[in-house]
Amino acid sequence: MAYVVIDTLKCTGCRICEFACSYHRDREFTAMSSSIILHRTDKKNYFGVILKLEREIVLARPEGEERLLPGQQAGEGSSGKPIVMREHCDGCDGEEELLCVLFCPTGCLQKGE
Amino acid sequence: MDFYNGRILVVNLDDGTSESFPLSEEKVMELIGGRGIKSFIEEYGDDALVVGTGVLTCSFFPSSCMGVISWKEGGNIKHLPLNWFFAPEFKLTGFDFLVIKGTSPKLVHLWIRDEICDILDGSSLNGLNIWDVVDKLKREHGDENIHLLVAGEDALSQDYWGGFDSNGCNEIFLRKNLKAIAVRGMGSLFFDEGKFKKFVELMRRAKGEIKEQLFNETLSKKGDLIRFLHRAVSCFNCGLNCNPFLMHRGNPKELKESELEEPGFLVLNPDYIEGSAEKAEDNLKRGHIPVKDDNSIPSSYSSFLKLHRVEIEDEKIFRYLNLGVCPIFMERIFKGDLSVLKDIIGNPREGL
């Protein structure tokens, strides 16, 4: 299965990855069904990406990546629908390529080899 | 209807009511055809303030962050471009256009989400600065991810970070007794698979061109403030990070979350910077823009475009706003070629 590699410092917070992922799920333009969400604390300009995998949650913070098991405290806010209630990344099963990687304009998201 | 929800929200502040109406296919063709948001003012009267999204606002089209506020004053129609995140968030509430008529007898704010709109008492917001209003409404509505337009001393602000309101939109908000509009979009928009494939082609083409770091241009005439650069940020669905965050308290090279509540500010518009970082932050908090004009397209926005080497006539800027795409992205990446949109929304040159 293809997987996503995150270079957080390349992220500029545009959020299109959430919509690309949701489009893979529902064929709709929404952020509500993605396995990936942008976490942002506006006034501190602190932002990074949270990705739900099958057995763990990746917190791609600017200062480094952390992997949590379900149930562990992330200390993060949620985006309308918490990450734990979302489906895990399936590597864009059935698509020609990873949609979040395709639409990420900065190269923050790359396909892992 | 592809790209649009098909709903117009009309708020009447005179009697505190709101209704929604269908957005017809004919109206959409008018919008794409070039008359754009102006037609709403003709339809709803000179008193109407219209917040509009473009056909491609909130789509896979790169730079689809743009919206526009339009109003009529002194016989002329004026427009305030919106970048950042407000317009896409608004479109995901289930509405495409917001028409605000009348004047409220007391200070209010609008809270729009899930195809509903509440007109809420704003008396507790009276006297608060922009940042305090944003903090308070995010807290009260229980969601960090809402986006807001907030009236300040003389300039309308997008979230904490100001905007381009040098041509008097803020004055209309104050006149209507409207302190803020808060939106949270959890809806969906639709388009067919053929259009998605076209978006994929355009994204592949654009990605090869996105190489520049435009925050340098944003700060180019602002002395040595670049020393405070933390991380530069994009508007919705854009890879051109025009917006530098200046961390003038603490260490801008520090990557972990700052322990300070307010370590700095984002520069959406360098006109807010007058000399020092402290002064710029004060302007943002007050909702004060140091530039004033009476233009149809605010001079502050035109000069922002020029700073990014985009010199186009107002009519073309207006065209991009109606399409919902950023003039900087369209001119720098797609070289101003509107025909790239042809397979997605028809021929947008018609009506120009």
Image (cartoon, helix red, strand yellow):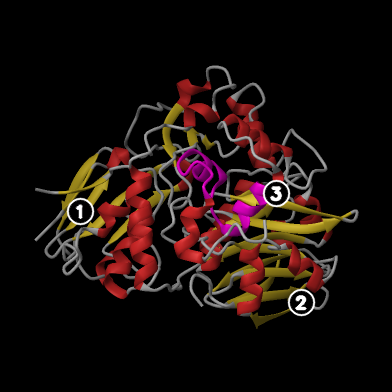
**Of B155 and B53, which appears nearest the observer?**
B53
Which quarter of the figure is the C terminus of chain B placed in? bottom right
Cα distance, mark 1 to mark 2? Answer: 46 Å
Magenta-span inclusion, residue B8: no
Q: Secondary structure at mark 2?
A: loop
Q: Nearer the viewer, mark 3 or mark 2?
A: 3
Magenta-colored span: B316-337
Left or right of residue B328: residue B22:
right
Judge whether residue B263 can be spotted in this image: no
**Which chain does the residue under circle 3 lie in?**
B
Judge whether residue B198 can be spotted in this image: yes
- What amino acid type is highlighted by mark number 2? Gly
Which residue is at a point 53% across and 41% down the rendered structure image?
A: B331
Residue annotated with mark 3? B315
How packed is label 2: few (under 14 Cα within 10 Å), some, or many (20 or more)?
Answer: some
Residue B175, placed above or below residue B103: above
- What amino acid type is highlighted by mark number 3? Glu
Residue annotated with mark 1? A58
Cα distance, mark 1 to mark 3? Answer: 46 Å
Residue B268, placed above or below residue B132: above
**Which chain does the residue under circle 2 lie in?**
B
Quadrant position of residue B283: top right
Please tell me the numbered disc located at residue B16: 2
Which residue is at a point 76% across and 44% down the rendered structure image?
A: B153
Q: Secondary structure at mark 3?
A: helix
> Is circle 3 on the same chain as circle 2?
yes
Which residue is at a point 65% across and 48% down the rendered structure image?
A: B316
Check contact, mark 1 vs mark 3: CB within 8 A: no
Quadrant position of residue B97: bottom right
